[in-house]
Image (cartoon, rainbow, N blue to C red):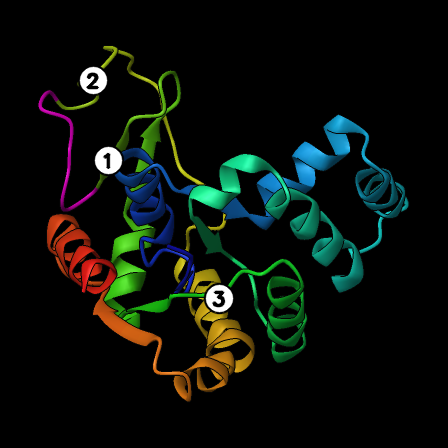
Amino acid sequence: MNLILLGPPGAGKGTQASRLVKERGMVQLSTGDMLRAAVAAGTPVGLAAKAVMDAGGLVSDEIVNGILSERLDQPDARAGFILDGYPRTDVQADALDAMLSGKGLALDHVIELVVDEDALVDRITGRFTCAKCGEGYHDRYKLPAVAGVCDVCGSSEFKRRADDNADTVRQRMLEYRAKTAPIIPHYEGRGIVSRVDGMANMDDVAAAIDAIVDA
């Protein structure tokens, strides 16, 4: 089972991908993780990426595609993969089609987590984590049982991401609608696109995804 999870930052893609990895043995292919792994492993494409990043440049589609191609050739990817954060553009979608075809692979599902922008802003701007163990909390939905004390490790130090603010979240939404959402028609003609309410309870989102995958 090979699928793409789509949705703006904060929609819950990472959470759902992690669950699919744990419960179904699938491999999550995040471009950032693959890039770091390729650089650390010193593969030819990884070395090319490192040279670009060391020079302060943006890694090209050609390099990203090369890193993904290398990763798909690893045995564990044959058990099924989840693409998270790729493709982001029509050009990348075309490249992915050619890459998968050349490897005898195909996409089974493209699942978009649909969100309400105002609700997403509320979800993201309220997030904070324990600075020691990383346990996640929220100003409205998940406060520590004892104010100022982490439920998991007892630490009293918490932190928030600097970019978890309303302006940044709305800018991410704007970029998603402008650049990534337009690739959905690329797959709709194949009948493999499904949409799930990303604002629903996490377990309800998971159940909806399972229903699509198991259909």
User: Residue reaching furthest front?
Assistant: 104
Task: Compare marks 1 and 3 and give the one earlier in the sequence.
Answer: 1
Dot 1 surroundings within 10 Å: few (below 14), some, or many (20 or more)?
A: some
Q: Judge left or right: residue 157 versus residue 45.
A: left
Can you say whether 30 is above or below 208 in the image?
above
Give the residue at mark 3.
Answer: 172
Question: Is residue 141 magenta-colored?
Answer: yes
In the rendered structure, which amino acid carries the disc numbered 2? Val
> Magenta stretch mostly in which secondary structure?
loop
Residue 201: mark in rendering: none
Task: Compare marks 3 and 2 and give the one earlier in the sequence.
Answer: 2
Identified at 29% across, 40% down, the residue is 24
In the rendered structure, which amino acid carries the disc numbered 3? Arg
The foreground one among 150 and 50 is 50
Secondary structure, mark 3, is helix
Q: Quadrant of residue 130?
A: top left
Q: Which residues are magenta?
A: 139-146
| Image spot of residue 132 (x, y percent) | 38, 16
Question: Is residue 90 magenta-colored?
Answer: no
| Image spot of residue 120 (x, y percent) | 29, 63
Give the residue at mark 2.
Answer: 149
Q: Quadrant of residue 179?
A: bottom right
Identified at 23% across, 10% down, the residue is 154
Give the residue at mark 1.
Answer: 137
| Image spot of residue 163 (x, y percent) | 49, 50
The foreground one among 94 and 144 is 94
Tell me whether circle 1 and circle 2 mark residues in contact (CB < 8 Å).
no
Task: Compare marks 1 and 2 and give the one earlier in the sequence.
Answer: 1
Secondary structure, mark 1, is strand
Identified at 29% across, 12% down, the residue is 155
Dot 3 surroundings within 10 Å: few (below 14), some, or many (20 or more)?
A: some
Comparing marks 3 and 2, which lies closer to the viewer?
Answer: 3
